[in-house]
Image (cartoon, rainbow, N blue to C red):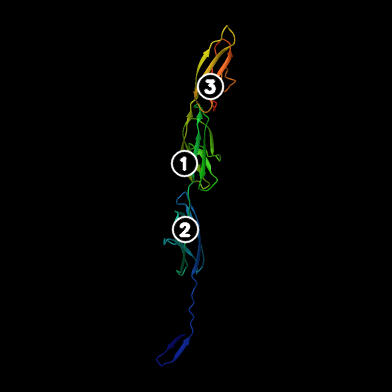
Amino acid sequence: TLVVKDANNCINKAVVVITSSPAPLITAIPAAATCSQSNGTITAFGSGGTGALQYSINGNIFQASTVFNNLTPGAYTVVVRDANGCTASMVVTVGNSAAPTVTAVSTPAACGNINGTITADGTGGISPYQYSINSGAFQSGNTFFGLAPGNYTIIIKDFAGCTSTISVTVASTNGPAVTVSSASSSCGTSNGTITASGSGGSGSLQYSIDGITYQASNIFTGLAPGNYVVYVRDFTGCI
């Protein structure tokens, strides 16, 4: 009640009501940064208060836009302010979508040919993954075929575009070697023999004297007099 009195002690009074405008309210939704970069976002949603609302993060300049871009992973204080200067705040955490990691295994190129392989395996990040070899075109398949001996760089890229690399070596398996000894045929008949001795290569060895039919035995019998070429073939087909 507001009372007024003059010099003659005359009094008048009135009831005055002082109102209070409500403070604004705020909620905010973060979007994670990818690959630990500065590309996270926070979108604020203000309501209530008086007049137009403005927004700020971490005490920086207020703005009319509700969206904050280019944020690194971490915690942020989001503030809303109305036309009367009333504020509300909340803490929001921008997460981090880490880059994927990649491992890879290779199989050797047999006989130094262009037949090695590399198989990559990705984890982490955001699937699905794509793979590239030596910065070539990306593919969904994780195996690369027809590789010559040498060093290769495998790149994995996840759905968010984050990448990781690994270096892989495709080895070369040397072909097998062979030495031979022979026993002559007698009286011009087909009773000569050839004994082959193979070494090197990969796995079990097979032998041939015509380059077509191979056998596990290293001895050829019943041979007529003449010249023969002895072949040795390993498990990978190297001759």
* Percent x, y of residue 229: 54, 16
Numbered disc total: 3
Frontmost residue, 40 versus 21: 40
Tell me which amino acid carries mark 1: Thr
Which picture quadrant has residue 145?
top right
Judging by the rendered image, the residue that carries numbered circle 3 is 232
Looking at the rendered image, the disc whose residue lies closer to the viewer, 3 or 1, is: 3
Q: Is residue 17 above or below residue 231?
A: below
Q: Is residue 168 above or below residue 38?
A: above
Label 3, label 1: how far apart the Cα atoms are: 40 Å
The secondary structure type at the circle numbered 2 is: strand
The secondary structure type at the circle numbered 3 is: strand
The reply to whether dot 3 and dot 2 touch (C-beta < 8 Å) is no
The reply to whether dot 3 and dot 1 touch (C-beta < 8 Å) is no
Looking at the rendered image, the disc whose residue lies closer to the viewer, 3 or 2, is: 3
Query: Label 2 neighbourhood size at 10 Å, few (<14), some (14-19), many (20+)?
Result: some
The secondary structure type at the circle numbered 1 is: strand
Tell me which amino acid carries mark 2: Thr
Q: Earlier in the sequence, mark 3 or mark 1?
A: 1
**What residue do we see at 53% from left, 42% from top?**
130
The reply to whether dot 2 and dot 1 touch (C-beta < 8 Å) is no
Judging by the rendered image, the residue that carries numbered circle 2 is 93
**What residue do we see at 46% from left, 41% from top?**
165
* Percent x, y of residue 65: 49, 59
Judging by the rendered image, the residue that carries numbered circle 1 is 165
Label 2, label 1: how far apart the Cα atoms are: 29 Å
